[in-house]
Image (tube, rainbow, N blue to C red):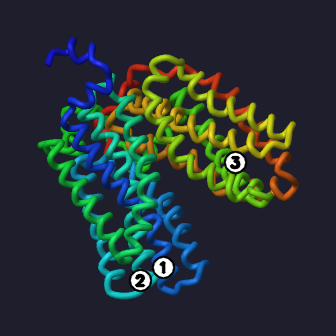
Amino acid sequence: MSTATRTAEPRAAMLRHNREFRLLWMGQTLSSFGSSMSGVALPLVLLASGHPVTAVAAVGTVVAAAGLAARIPAGFVSDRFDERRLLIGCDLVRLAAIGMVAVWSAFGPLPLWPAMGAVVVSAGAVEVFKPSQYRLIRRVVSPEQIASAVSLNQARTYGAEIAGPAAAGLLLGLRPALPFALDALTFLVSAVCIAAAVPARRTGPAAREAAPAARTGPEPGFWHRFTVGWRHLAADPFLRRSTLYFCGLTLVFTAFGSALVLGVGRERGGAQMVGWAVSTAALAGLLGSLAAPALQRRLPTRVLVSLGPAAATLLLLTAWLTGSNLAFVAGFSAMCLLVPVINATVSTVMATSVPEEIYGRVATANDFSVQLLQPFGPLAAGLLVSRSLPTAAVVLAVGLGVLALLAVTLPTPTPVPPRPEPAWSQP
């Protein structure tokens, strides 16, 4: 197929004809579905095994802490080794970890320590998988397809969150081990899809970058190479500002969700309203992900990034002025619909502007930075709701309004990748 013909085709059609991307997407869709099942099944199986609620809750804390601790080293590893081998290795590691949980659950109550070990190992593998996955997509997808590829990847996650919990409940009713066994099988399918989709490179990144001809000076030390992601974020005007924006957005959005549960849920009929809002959040995210490519082609980046906070600000101010719980819930639904559009927009900018050889470190440095304040969201929501729900509404509206203003002042992203560092400066 000629280049001109490919350019004339719609982006979605181009991806349908991209065998490599189809295989990767199908494998990861199944894997996301399996992980969504395990995420719901694990605490339920642990509770049924007789463990106290506090111990089961600690598993979730351990997952978050392990992921955060592994994030920056994972970016370094993803840039150091061939992304295809890393992805297959991560899938096989998760297969072994979840498979162990499945076997243990099949023969009796699940102890806490193997469950804790499995989630720690899986969390570390996930952190290596994420940047490596985007590096591999850059190998198999042309630049004009990246926006659609990012959006379809987001859509599969939301689709899994819709279908996975229901499937987990059904399978748990049959046998406690079934959700974990099926999840382990999806990792095997994913590894096979990756192996079939992309041929192995003859030389990995490290071998290519170690060529003596590429060296023009003394090789920098480990710390210089380890921190290149942070330095790139600080040097790039768009990424520097967008990281600050996302840090605030993550905090406010987390507080928004917690305030919805704590504030609306305690009022008469609030439980039903909260259930409706939460159940539609994944569907709204799916629709937003699917709409993202079309919106990116039609609207400037600043408008896309400011749209969600601006809409939620107006609805929260309405909730504050009228005392309407419906307006509060509508603001949350608007954010659930538009946050995927924001994520897809900035992810596309990163995928098309960050040099490939440092992408893993830049992506993980960005993820680490934007989630630093997230743990304070539920606490902030509790303090605000303890005063009143209208107080929470107006404070959240102010925060989202500031973020909307910050979004419209974002610099124009650089469409051409900046000049990469000398090859010897990479790992």
Q: Is residue 96 left or right of residue 374?
A: left
Q: Does the rendering let one see residue 221?
A: no
* Quadrant of the rendered image containing residue 180: bottom left
Given residues 156 and 236, the one toward you in this image is 156
- In the rendered image, residue 326, in percent from the top left (x then y), is placed at 74, 43
Q: CA distance from mark 2 to mark 3?
A: 35 Å
- In the rendered image, residue 405, in percent from the top left (x then y), is placed at 70, 26
Which amino acid, mark 2?
Leu
* Quadrant of the rendered image containing residue 347: top left
Image point 47% across, 85% down: which residue?
49
Residue of label 1: 46
Q: Quadrant of the N terminus?
A: top left
Give the secondary structure at mark 3.
helix
Proximity of marks 2 and 1: CB atoms separated by less than 8 Å: yes
Image point 67% across, 28% down: which residue?
406
Q: Is residue 13 left or right of residue 58?
A: left
Given residues 74 and 199, the one toward you in this image is 199
In terms of sequence position, does the residue under pointer 2 or pointer 3 come before the other?
2
Which amino acid, mark 3?
Phe
Residue of label 3: 256
- Which numbered disc covers residue 110? 2
* Quadrant of the rendered image containing residue 109: bottom left
Mark 3 Cα-neighbour bin, 10 Å: few <14, some 14–19, many ≥20: many
